[in-house]
């Protein structure tokens, strides 16, 4: 996984390594054929988004040591599923995003103008 494009067509930058994120747990929101959730949006967590995600059945705030997952808190960056980010947007709960670390494949699910409105 190298030089995958971000939403600008440039190489995707690192989203976060503490906690380690990405479908491939390499710190980047890279994707491939085995990433059915399309974990391509580098989002900055908020309490509001974490509560929303939990209410939708995806608890990202509770630690799961058996999977080496520390649980997320406000301020952490995390590679979200593109469709989950769009769902949060539709419900008025979308978190801010790092565009340079957001994979181009996100544009298959989310309008670029919406992404730009939430850029950090």
Image (cartoon, rainbow, N blue to C red):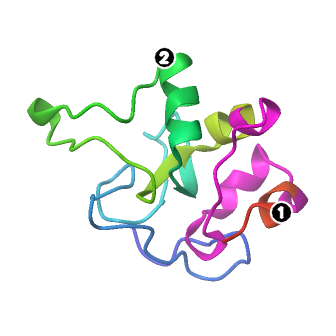
Q: Is residue 79 positioned above or below 1 on the image?
A: above
Secondary structure state at the residue bearing disc 1:
helix
Residue 66 in percent (x, y) is at: 9, 31
- Marks 2/1 in contact by CB < 8 Å: the verdict is no
Secondary structure state at the residue bearing disc 2:
loop
Q: Residue furthest bottom?
A: 10
Could you tell whether 51 is left or right of 66 in the image? right
Q: Which residues are magenta?
A: 88-113
Can residue 112 be found in the magenta stretch? yes
Which one is earlier in the sequence, the residue at label 2 or at label 1?
Answer: 2
Quadrant showing the C terminus = bottom right
- Which numbered disc covers residue 57? 2
Which residue matches tag 1?
117
Quadrant showing the N terminus = bottom left
Tell me which corner region of the image, top left, top right, bottom left or bottom right, holds residue 101. Answer: bottom right
Q: Is residue 103 positioned above or below 57 on the image?
A: below
Can residue 37 be found in the magenta stretch? no
Query: Between 91 and 7, which is closer to the camera in this rendering?
Result: 91
């Amino acid at each position: 996984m190298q030089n995958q494009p971000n939403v600008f067509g440039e190489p995707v930058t690192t989203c976060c390594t503490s906690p380690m994120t990405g479908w491939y747990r390499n710190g980047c929101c890279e994707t491939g054929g085995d990433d059915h959730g399309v974990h391509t949006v580098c989002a900055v967590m908020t309490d509001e988004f974490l509560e929303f995600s939990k209410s939708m059945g995806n608890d990202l705030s509770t630690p799961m040591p058996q999977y080496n997952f520390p649980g997320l808190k406000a301020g952490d960056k995390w590679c979200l599923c593109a469709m989950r980010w769009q769902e949060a947007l539709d419900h008025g709960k979308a978190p801010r995003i790092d565009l340079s670390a957001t994979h181009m494949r996100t544009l298959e699910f989310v309008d670029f103008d919406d992404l730009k409105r939430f850029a950090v």
